[in-house]
Image (spheres, helix red, strand yellow):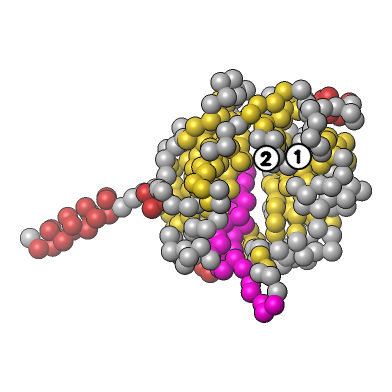
């Protein structure tokens, strides 16, 4: 009788476990060192802070600190040959004051980019960009100050999903999923959150997979990577060892996240994000590691690049990762992950 009661209790406890929770420990994963396998990506363009994106046959390199006339550069994704540049810097019509992240529409013919100085979204026609070096976008959409999408992907011709920034004060904000209707101009909160993050100051990177119809939020100041279904419901919470203990926001965890054909890849620090030295300003520390999760949220391996990673993107077709490094003589480079 006692045995049956004990067995029943174990069965109840097991059935009550939250199957949406996954856990990982970096120290237990296989480490693959690619530091000697990085191939330089040389460009004639002077690019100070390149943000990388891939869509269709194009590699987009957006220089977030551009000081020249144009800051959005297009390359052939496969050959990495330079094709042209666009996104004129300036205050005039069709010009951009401060670049955001490129997002290509599902038809692959246009891309949108936010201008955080003019508080507008600009739409570019890719064929026109490649045919006319003087091309300027004629379509723009304003966005609100109190809630707007900082990073986003289009899920249809009129709807984009991404990280919505909710302004709490002139110097603080929090991140949730957001939904932008291009036709109506409405940008609203979307989807669920982990209960421990509701109301907290948060910041996160976002990605959406057209192939798998899932999304990801990788939190910078909390040890949690959340995968979502396309309707905003939670698929998995992937929790690291620190979970929600942020130690006064000193710790940094996840960086950029990208959902590929087989892997979810994200950069990861997992320690204090700043180094302090006497009589010197704080140094921002960046990760040299990429974590590779399978699509079920299990940590498969850790890629050690040996260099500080700022931005990266997955090129699934060619089985490679393209990176922008902060401490390499040649900042742009790539390696094969297969």
At 65% from the left and 26% from the top, the residue drawn is 141
**Of the pair 111 and 149, the residue shown nearer to us:** 149
User: In what element is the residue under mark 2?
Assistant: loop
Q: Toward the viewer: 246 or 141?
A: 141
Task: Mark 2: give few (<14), some (14-19) or many (20+) Cα within 10 Å.
Answer: some
Which image quarter: residue 14? Answer: bottom left
Residue 213 or residue 99, whichever sits in front: 99
- Range drawn in magenta: 251-279
> Residue farthest to the right?
44
| Residue 220 pos. (x, y %) | 55, 56
Q: Residue at x 62, y 51 (%)?
A: 256
Compared to residue 18, the image places residue 252 above or below, namely below
User: Residue 264: within the magenta?
Assistant: yes
Give x and y (percent) for residue 152: 61, 37
Quick one: which residue is furthest to the front in this view?
170
Cα–Cα span, label 2 and label 1:
7 Å
Name the residue that disc number 1 marks. Answer: 97
Magenta span dominant secondary structure = strand
| Marks 2 and 1 in Cβ contact (< 8 Å) | yes
Furthest residue in direction left, as rendered: 1
Instruction: Tell me the tag on residue 116.
Output: 2
In the image, 267 versus 304, the foreground residue is 267
Say which residue appears at 31% left-offset and 52% top-offset: 17
In the rendered image, residue 213, in percent from the top left (x then y), is placed at: 54, 34
Quarter holding residue 142: top right
Callout 1: SS: loop
Please name the residue shown 73% across and 65% down the image: 307
Pick the quarter of the image with the N terminus.
bottom left
Q: Tag 1: Cα neighbours inside 10 Å, few (<14), some, or many (≥20)?
A: some
Q: Is residue 29 visible?
A: no
Visible residue check, residue 96: yes
């Amino acid at each position: 009788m006692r045995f049956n009661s004990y067995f029943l209790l174990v069965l109840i406890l097991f059935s009550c476990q939250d199957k949406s929770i996954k856990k990982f420990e970096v120290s237990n994963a296989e480490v693959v060192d690619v530091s000697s396998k990085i191939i330089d990506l040389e460009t004639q363009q002077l690019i100070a802070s390149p943000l990388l994106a891939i869509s269709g046959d194009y590699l987009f390199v957006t220089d977030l600190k551009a000081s020249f006339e144009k800051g959005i550069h297009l390359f052939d994704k496969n050959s990495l040959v330079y094709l042209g540049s666009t996104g004129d810097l300036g205050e005039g019509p069709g010009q951009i004051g401060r670049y955001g992240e490129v997002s290509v529409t599902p038809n692959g013919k246009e891309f949108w980019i936010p201008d955080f100085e003019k508080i507008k979204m600009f739409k570019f026609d890719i064929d026109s960009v490649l045919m006319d070096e003087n091309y300027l976008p004629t379509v723009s959409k304003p966005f609100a100050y109190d809630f707007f999408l900082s990073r986003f992907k289009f899920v249809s011709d009129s709807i984009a999903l991404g990280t919505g920034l909710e302004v709490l004060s002139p110097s603080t904000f929090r991140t949730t999923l957001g939904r932008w209707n291009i036709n109506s101009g409405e940008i609203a909160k979307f989807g669920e959150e982990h209960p421990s993050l509701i109301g907290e100051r948060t910041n996160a990177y976002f990605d959406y997979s057209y192939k798998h119809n899932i999304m990801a939020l990788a939190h910078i100041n909390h040890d949690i990577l959340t995968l979502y279904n396309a309707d905003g419901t939670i698929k998995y919470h992937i929790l690291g060892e620190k979970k929600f203990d942020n130690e006064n926001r000193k710790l940094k965890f996840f960086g950029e996240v990208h959902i590929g054909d087989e892997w979810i890849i994200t950069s990861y620090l997992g320690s204090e994000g700043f180094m302090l030295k006497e009589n010197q300003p704080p140094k921002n520390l960046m990760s040299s590691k990429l974590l590779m999760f399978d699509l079920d949220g299990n940590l498969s391996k850790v890629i050690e690049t040996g260099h500080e990673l700022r931005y990266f993107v997955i090129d699934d077709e060619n089985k490679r990762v393209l990176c922008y490094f902060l401490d390499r003589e040649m900042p742009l480079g790539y390696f094969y992950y297969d």
